[in-house]
Amino acid sequence: METTTIQPSTVNTASTDFLPLQGTDYVEFYVGNAKQAAHFYKTAFGFQSLAYAGPETGVKDKVSYVIRQHKLTFVLTTPLRAGNVIADHIYKHGDGVKVIALKVEDAKDAYEETTKRGGKPYLQPTVLKDDNGEVVLSGIHTYGETAHLFVERKNYHGVFMPGFIEWKSDYNPAETGLLYVDHCVGNVGWNQMNPWVKFYEEVMGFKNILSFDDKDISTEYSALMSKVMSNGNGFVKFPINEPAEGKKKSQVEEYLDFYDGEGVQHVAIATNDIVKTVAELQRRGIEFLNIPDSYYVDVLDRVGHIDEDLAPLQELGILIDRDEEGYLLQIFSKPLEDRPTLFFEIIQRKGAKSFGKGNFKALFEALEREQDARGNL
């Protein structure tokens, strides 16, 4: 595999969307044991083996397992020794999201457009080559120790990217209907939401499409504030949360304490049949937040007609909300780690483009019950 670093050059800024994104390419997690994590995600979530990089492929300091389900790709990376940035990241944060990789037409241009607007360089434009073509990567830092990579793969025809080989496995559990990343939510510190909103507006050309204050997202005990950032075509959306004053510690404060800093709180994954997906995930051992039966007593009065029967939604704990364009169904897992940090959302959109504002109170109360059980409320 060849690696080439591209030097910056003058770019054309005439386009109205200076950072056209084609969606999420992959999400990379730094984990303590990538082999075991890959087995877990295959078993519990229905991912399939895709690619591998490690000592056998010439990578001496880390291993990475790539798993995929439809258009949803996770990269699980672990260090082989202590005393490096990956090992330090895991020691500080536990298992968590390090990279949100975004698919672009031109990774060099994406790097130049974002860094000249104030983006802090993470990876200069770099060309990776093998017999299957080339992938161009570049990247910038975002909140905490999280990074955005820009991935240009139009000239590549291999299994994942240069440096990886196909990972063939006889163990391939059936999929669960997970399709692609709907959005990724970041938790930032006190009074840091607006600075990061400004970052996404100025550096990446995103727009603030929704805002929620502590009146929208609160209970008797805790609150948070959130703003949803979206790129020009709406393919990439990043809600950003910060704590708000309350009687007790909010879920964002708990996350910041246990993650030891800012980072990705949850990844929302789309499905076309949430009842089937969630039922299968529960069968495989994934635990979701418990929603009281009282939520469902008048939920249809609030959201109106839905195509699904209410009984299985109630049995599984799936939440419902509606906006001007339709409705959505959503559910939130309990944390996937021993630290109360990273979790997943499963979402099915039936026209709705919002994020479940009508469910915030029920969701927050469910989270608070879990916090109280941990002694962290």
Image (cartoon, rainbow, N blue to C red):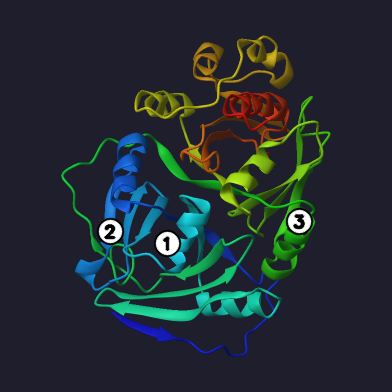
Task: State which quadrant residue 43 falls in.
Answer: top left
Q: Earlier in the sequence, mark 3 or mark 1?
A: 1
Residue depicted at 47% across the width and 34% down the height: 272
Task: State which quadrant residue 291 falls in.
Answer: top right
Q: Amino acid at mark 3?
A: Gln
Residue depicted at 49% across the width and 80% down the height: 125
Q: Position of residue 210 (x, y in %)?
A: 75, 46
Q: Earlier in the sequence, mark 2 or mark 3?
A: 2
Q: Amino acid at mark 2?
A: Ala
Q: Nearer the viewer, residue 84 or 70?
A: 84
Question: Element at badge 2?
Answer: strand
Binning the other alpha carbons within 10 Å of mark 2 as few (below 14), some (14 to 19) or many (20 upward) gives many
Question: In this image, 362 relative to 279: left or right?
Answer: right
In the rendered structure, find residue 51 and report the number of the disc placed on it. 2
Q: Which residue is mark 1?
A: 87
Q: Is residue 209 above or below residue 202?
A: above
Q: Nearer the viewer, residue 75 or 50?
A: 75
Question: In this image, 368 relative to 169: left or right?
Answer: right
Distance from disc 2 to disc 1, alpha carbons, whole Å, reads: 22 Å
Q: Which residue is mark 3?
A: 192
Q: Amino acid at mark 1?
A: Ala
Q: Nearer the viewer, mark 2 or mark 1?
A: 1
| Residue 27 in view (yes/no) | no
Binning the other alpha carbons within 10 Å of mark 3 as few (below 14), some (14 to 19) or many (20 upward) gives some
Distance from disc 2 to disc 3, alpha carbons, whole Å, reads: 37 Å
Q: Is residue 12 above or below residue 74?
A: below
Binning the other alpha carbons within 10 Å of mark 1 as few (below 14), some (14 to 19) or many (20 upward) gives some
Q: Nearer the viewer, mark 3 or mark 1?
A: 1
